[in-house]
Amino acid sequence: MQISRRASDLKPSATIAVTNRAKQMQAQGVDVLSFAAGEPDFDTPEPIKEAAIAALRAGQTKYMPTMGDTRTREVIAAKASKQNGIPNITAEHIGISSGGKHALYTAYQCLFDFPRPNESPSECLIPVPAWVSYMPLAELAGAKVVELPTTTATGFKISPVQLKSAITPRSRVLVLCTPSNPCGTMYSEDELRALAAVVAEAARTIAPDLVVLADEIYEKVAYAGIPHFSIGSVPEIAERTVTINGLSKAYSMTGWRVGYTVASGEWGLKFICAMATLQGQMTTNITSFVYPAIRTALLECEAEAQMFCAKFGERARLIHARLTGIPGLVCAKPTGAFYAFPDISAHFGKTSPAGRRISGALDFCEALLAESLVAAVPGEDFGGCGRNHVRFSFACSDDTINRGMDRLTKFVADLR
Ligand code: PMP
Ligand code: GLU
């Protein structure tokens, strides 16, 4: 019997696939050093856990309002307003979903349509290399993905001129992820203001329905002196920006599944209502006893988030120094998130000691895992020049970084 084309054509998540494979090998007792998962290795801070335990004990175990209880939505609205400068938001402009990924899925579904007969599809503009889920989920919602290529030399950032020339009357969404997964780089405030000006101008002229989808899930992981800036705070485009965020990365809460969406003003209210309708048919509210934990994280755990960030900064310096010491590897300095994204293409065409031919990043990663027991994500599915790159997540200990880089150094030295 058939599986739908929608499901069977969907590309599996490469990040999840490599992470699961590494975990499986570790469970079998294989000494794999994993640089696969974009998942902080720290435990969730104790006060956050205590808040959930207390809510559970107090019996907060029933269905709750679909987009979250008002108190928690108010806390997120206050945070988005004070810390991110996003104007015109109340609790009603916030939606809480089961992770940033679920928020992204739901937001896309509320932004794109499948084209009618004789209609061209809506376009989703995505600077690439980009996180593996942006493209398949946009296509699932009916969009045509338009890749905006970037390179190591420009810090993997698009320019205003490049954006301007990519926008057409069919452009519906521009995805921006800063700090970036997988590139580990960030846009400055000036750079984002310049992109916002292009979006505002295009919205006045050729693309009236253009929306910026700003993924800020790594906002608290910025350790190189570039302050995180929210493009949704720019007044000209505030009401056409959908900001996605979550607790996974900042507070080491990947397994809790908490993501949220912020959309400003009158249109934002309508947008969150549309998301609520979809979510009400899909998942309803997130786990009810998690709400107090969200408030505790946002109101009381800034110090922990800063401590995690400082640690990621130290690791960024360590892994960058190690990677750039390996012949043939070229790597932009990570300034945010916890990824190093070296270009390894100088080694394409070579053969590993066990006879594997390295013709791309996927071959490189397969040989590295099989022969040196180091797991990393090949860049093909990130799009654009990603095919020349491998992503190393440094959300792991200094010891793992040092031992993993020792193995990588030897692996590369042994390629012929
Ligand atoms: N956006 C980006 C760029 C990510 O790397 C992730 C990591 N999974 C997410 C969104 C979603 O994270 P989560 O679903 O855990 O909130
Ligand atoms: N975002 C993380 C990563 O890129 C977690 C896995 C996923 O959701 O893709 O590794």
Image: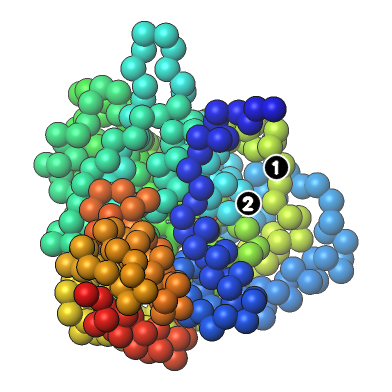
Cα distance between the residues tagged 1 and 2: 8 Å
Q: Is residue 319 above or below residue 60?
A: below
Dot 2 alpha-carbon crowd within 10 angstroms: few under 14, some 14 to 19, many 20 or more: some
Residue in the foreground of this view, choosing between 136 and 244: 136
Q: State the image coordinates of residue 5 (x, y, percent, origin top left).
A: 55, 28
Q: Please identify the residue farthest to the top as the structure is shown.
A: 118
Q: State the image coordinates of residue 114 (x, y, percent, origin top left).
A: 46, 21
Residue under the point 60% across and 28% down = 4
Q: What is the secondary structure assignment of the residue under circle 2?
A: loop
Residue under the point 63% across and 58% down = 257
Q: State the image coordinates of residue 358 (x, y, percent, origin top left).
A: 28, 63
- Observer able to see residue 311: yes
Q: Which mark is residue 98?
A: 2
Residue in the foreground of this view, choosing between 390 and 182: 390
Q: State the image coordinates of residue 218 (x, y, percent, origin top left).
A: 42, 64
Q: Which mark is residue 241?
A: none
Q: Earlier in the sequence, mark 1 or mark 2?
A: 2
Among the 4 quarters of the image, the one containing residue 343:
bottom left
Q: Which mark is residue 283?
A: 1
Dot 1 alpha-carbon crowd within 10 angstroms: few under 14, some 14 to 19, many 20 or more: few
Q: What is the secondary structure assignment of the residue under circle 1?
A: loop
| Label 1–label 2 contact, CB within 8 A | yes
Among the 4 quarters of the image, the one containing residue 24:
bottom right
Tag count in the figure?
A: 2
Quarter the N terminus occupies: top right
The three-letter amino acid code for the residue at tag 2 is Ser
